[in-house]
């Protein structure tokens, strides 16, 4: 037998044994403040394998063992319409709206992101099936409402709607929409982040400062600056804060809903982890090049060159690692930018140490660079109405 086969067989034996041990152990009683039944059945899909039913408990353990998968329990048809002949793929011309974008970039600040992230990380966990995860979502919704009412002019406010996209678990996704002025172009541009956090063991504290509190406040600051500039898009622009990124549940549900309603999403940009600059490394933006749309990603690189004050580095997750993958699965072009190369990213995520004050490697200045990218993405693809 070849050595690799022996190693593989051994690994799967150890894996099977560890799962068996896990199954034989009595599962802990339901914890108060969580609506998480460890015996509930979930349908998961590992890369290149047929979907399989597992318990929530086993799902958590598989994740801890490093397995990567979609939880497709509630979205089993996502992607089936991918070859839809009616969907015309867009091309992305080089960015050229510097006169409109640059003045807005100058108004971005670290103040809002600091205050908002301090509050957002004060919830014990933002786990999607926890009471505090629900409370953090309600807080985010009220913050969006406050920013909209306090920043947008009365006429701009008429173009804006925000809503909760309801899920069967406790925490809802949030969708903010700025209606485009065009009557002929039905295209929609989406900027997203996930609002939930998790510890590897979901009942433990998960401040989620970087993952993905950082992305959540990064795009909120971009939204605030666009409203302050009285920005009116030609195409409809949306900001999404997804629930339940673990298993990509929230974004799959939203993407499935959009696909079912034939919403013409021409571009989706995900911001997940934007704060960390590893000591001793060059400050840069990581552009993910796997599980993304190559044309939109090339366009995203051009945006970094033109509008961010740091260079980009191409990098890979190696798996469908964030919500952009749900949009891709639904057949829509998506792109994903992170704080650094995948290797140099924050290793405190999914633990109680994912905190703002854990290290001076956590940088609000770095985060601000990503708000620039979000503003540029919005204006360059959304167009603007004078
Ligand atoms: N933000 C992480 C993914 C990530 C980690 C990106 C490190 C860049 C660097 C994301 O929230 C996450 O936890 N993803 C899951 C997989 C997903 C399918 C739920 C993961 O990495 O285990
Ligand atoms: Zn994340």
Image (cartoon, rainbow, N blue to C red):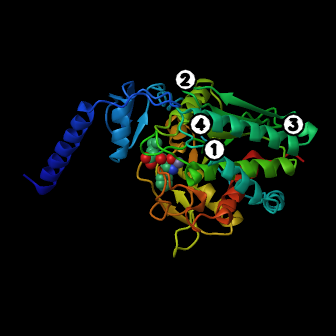
**Residue that carries the numbered disc 2 in the rendered image:** 168
Of the two numbered discs 2 and 1 on the same chain, state the one appearing first in sequence: 2
- Residue lying furthest bottom: 280
The reply to whether residue 213 is in sight is yes
Mark 3 vs mark 2, foreground winner is: 2
Of the two numbered discs 3 and 1 on the same chain, state the one appearing first in sequence: 3
Of the two numbered discs 3 and 2 on the same chain, state the one appearing first in sequence: 3
**Residue that carries the numbered disc 1 in the rendered image:** 192
**Residue that carries the numbered disc 3 in the rendered image:** 157
Q: Position of residue 358 (x, y in %)?
A: 55, 62
The yes-or-no answer for disc 1 within 8 Å of ligand 2 is no
| Above or below: residue 167 compared with residue 269 | above
**Residue that carries the numbered disc 4 in the rendered image:** 132
Tell me which residue sits at (56%, 49%) in the image.
Answer: 207
Tell me the CA gap for discs 4 and 2.
16 Å
| Above or below: residue 378 compared with residue 24 | below
Q: Position of residue 209 (x, y in %)?
A: 59, 53
| Above or below: residue 67 compared with residue 277 | above
Mark 2 vs mark 1, foreground winner is: 2
């Amino acid at each position: 037998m070849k050595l690799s086969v022996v190693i593989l067989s051994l690994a799967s034996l150890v894996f099977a044994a560890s799962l068996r041990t896990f199954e034989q152990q009595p599962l802990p009683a339901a914890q108060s403040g969580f609506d998480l039944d460890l015996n509930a059945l979930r349908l998961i899909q590992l890369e290149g394998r047929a979907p399989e039913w597992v318990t929530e408990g086993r799902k958590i353990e598989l994740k801890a063992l490093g397995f990567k998968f979609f939880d497709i329990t509630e979205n089993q048809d996502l992607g089936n319409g991918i070859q839809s002949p009616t969907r015309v793929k867009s091309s992305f011309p080089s960015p050229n709206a510097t006169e409109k974008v640059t003045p807005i970039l100058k108004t971005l600040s670290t103040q809002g992101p600091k205050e908002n992230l301090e509050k957002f990380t004060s919830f014990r966990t933002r786990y999607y099936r926890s009471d505090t995860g629900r409370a953090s979502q309600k807080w985010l919704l009220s913050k969006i409402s406050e920013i909209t009412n306090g920043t947008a002019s009365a006429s701009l406010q008429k173009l804006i709607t925000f809503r909760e996209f309801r899920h069967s678990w406790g925490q809802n996704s949030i969708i903010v929409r700025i209606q485009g002025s065009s009557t002929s172009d039905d295209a929609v541009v989406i900027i997203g982040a996930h609002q939930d956090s998790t510890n590897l063991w979901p009942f433990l504290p998960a401040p989620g400062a970087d993952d993905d509190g950082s992305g959540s406040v990064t795009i909120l600051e971009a939204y605030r600056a666009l409203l302050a500039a009285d920005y009116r898009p030609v195409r409809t622009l949306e900001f999404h804060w997804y629930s339940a990124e673990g298993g990509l549940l929230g974004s799959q549900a939203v993407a499935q809903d959009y696909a079912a309603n034939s919403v013409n999403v021409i571009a989706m940009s995900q911001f997940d982890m934007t704060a960390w600059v590893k000591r001793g490394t060059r400050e840069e933006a990581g552009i993910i090049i796997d599980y993304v749309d190559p044309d939109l990603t090339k366009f995203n690189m051009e945006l970094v060159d033109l509008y961010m004050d740091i260079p980009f580095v191409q990098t890979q997750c190696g798996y469908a690692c964030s919500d952009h993958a749900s949009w891709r699965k639904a057949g829509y072009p998506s792109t994903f930018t992170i704080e650094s190369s995948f290797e140099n990213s924050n290793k405190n995520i999914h633990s109680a140490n994912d905190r703002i004050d854990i290290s001076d490697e956590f940088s609000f200045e770095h985060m601000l660079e990503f708000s620039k990218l979000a503003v540029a993405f919005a204006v360059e693809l959304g167009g603007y109405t004078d």
